[in-house]
Image (tube, rainbow, N blue to C red):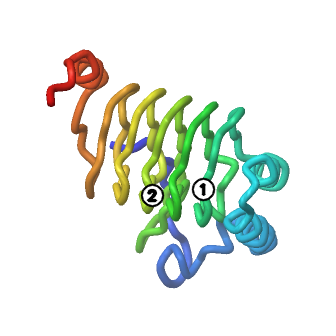
Amino acid sequence: MRKTDRFDVKGEGNSLWNLYTSVSIYKVAKNFIVIQLARYTPFFGVKNWLYRTFLRMEVGHQTAVALMVFPDVMFPERIRIGNNTIIGFNSTILAHEYLIDEYRIGNVIIGDEVMIGANSTILPGVTIGNGAVISAASLVNKDIPAGAFAGGNPVRIIYTAEQRAAQKQKPFKV
C-alpha cells in the first residue's frame, strides 16, 4: 500500500469538482506556469532552480530532469529527487490523486543515482530507492527497493540489486 493521507470530500460533486477547497487556485496557476517553463527549458541548472525556488521541490545536485517532465502541479513541495538522478522524457510525478469520494496526498521520494525511463508515471506515496532503474513507460504504483531494476504497468521488480550485481559479473560471450 502506498503511503498517502486520505481526505474525505464534503460538498457536492466528486473530489476533483471540489479541487479548490483543498488547494489554492493561485498556487495551482503559479505552479502551472513554472512547470510549463521548466518543461521546455533545456538547461538543467535553470530547470532545477525553478523547481527549488518556485515549487519548493527538493532536487539533488547534478540531477537531470528531461524535457516535458510534469511534476505534480498541486503539491510539488511533496516531491524529493536525490543527487545525480535522471528523470526521463515526458514522465509524470504525482503527489496527489483525486477519487470520487476522497482525495489522497503522498510524498514521492526518489533516491540518489536513480534512472527513470521516458514516459513513466510515478504515483503519490511511492519511494524509489538509491540506484534503482525504472524502465520506460512504467507505472510506479509501489515502492522500489534500492538497486532494483523494475518496469511495466503496473511496475514489477525484474531484477533485485543482488541479481543485477551478479549479472554484471558474468563474462560477455561472443
Residue, far left: 174
Residue 171: x percent and y percent?
20, 18
Residue 49: x percent and y percent?
81, 48
**Residue that appears at 58% across and 61% down:** 69
Residue 113: x percent and y percent?
53, 31
Badge 1: residue crowd in 10 Å (few <14, some 14–19, many ≥20): many
Question: What residue is shown with label 2?
Answer: 118
Badge 2: residue crowd in 10 Å (few <14, some 14–19, many ≥20): many
**Residue that appears at 68% across and 74% down:** 20
Indicate the amino acid at tag 1: Ala
**On screen, 42 above or below 21?**
above
Indicate the amino acid at tag 2: Ala
**On screen, 49 above or below 94?**
above
Callout 2: SS: loop
Quadrant occupied by the C terminus: top left
**On screen, 65 above or below 172?**
below
Badge 1 or badge 2: first in the primary sequence: 1
Which disc, if any, is residue 167?
none
Which disc, if any, is residue 66?
1
